[in-house]
Image (spheres, rainbow, N blue to C red):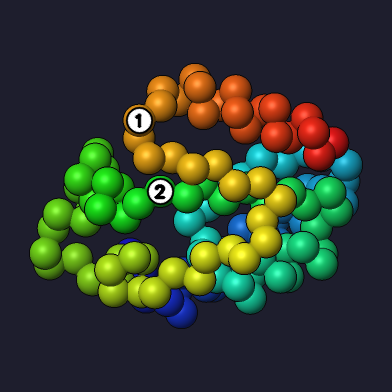
Amino acid sequence: KKYTFKDRLKIVKQYGSLCKNLSNQNINVIFCVVGLMKKVRSWNKKNIQNYLEIFIKSPINKVRKLSKKKIYKKKYIQDVVGLDIKPEFPRSPHITIKNDFNKSINILSKELIKKINKIT
């Protein structure tokens, strides 16, 4: 697989198109992607009805330390977002959840649901 910025951009655009097509058919979609690209988020906001952007903000040092995939520990892997590719963090997501890995996933999920309910 290729992980360059250009390759990632192509894949994330395809995901956005898929979500748009499903949304146009009145199908609710929840889609998770590490797509830290402003161009794609802007397109999504303009083209996907009822689009809701949720940003999970986590310190990169803890992500590297706790990652089960260990992608951040392998020195031979290139094109890693946060290391080789500069992430374009969202400036105004609808919801931001801070995950410093000190809370359980259940607590974080409850926080997220409360924030979604306030918006919808």
Image spot of residue 107 (x, y percent): 51, 22
Instruction: Look at label 1 and name its amino acid.
Output: Asn
Q: Which of disc 1 and disc 2 is earlier in sequence?
A: 2
Which residue is at a point 82% across and 67% down the rendered structure image?
46
- Density class for disc 2 (Cα within 10 Å; few <14, some 14-19, many ≥20) is few
Which element type, helix, strand or loop, lies under badge 2?
loop
For the residue pair 39 and 107, the one nearer the viewer reads as 107
Which residue is at a point 37% across and 40% down the rendered structure image?
100
For the residue pair 98 and 47, the one nearer the viewer reads as 98
Left or right side of 109 for 120? right
Left or right side of 11 for 28? right
Q: Is residue 94 above or below residue 111?
A: below
Q: Residue 66: in sight, yes or no?
A: yes
Q: Which mark is residue 102?
A: 1
Which element type, helix, strand or loop, lies under badge 1?
loop
The residue where tag 2 is placed is 58
Which residue is at a point 13% across and 58% down the rendered structure image?
74
Q: How many marks?
A: 2
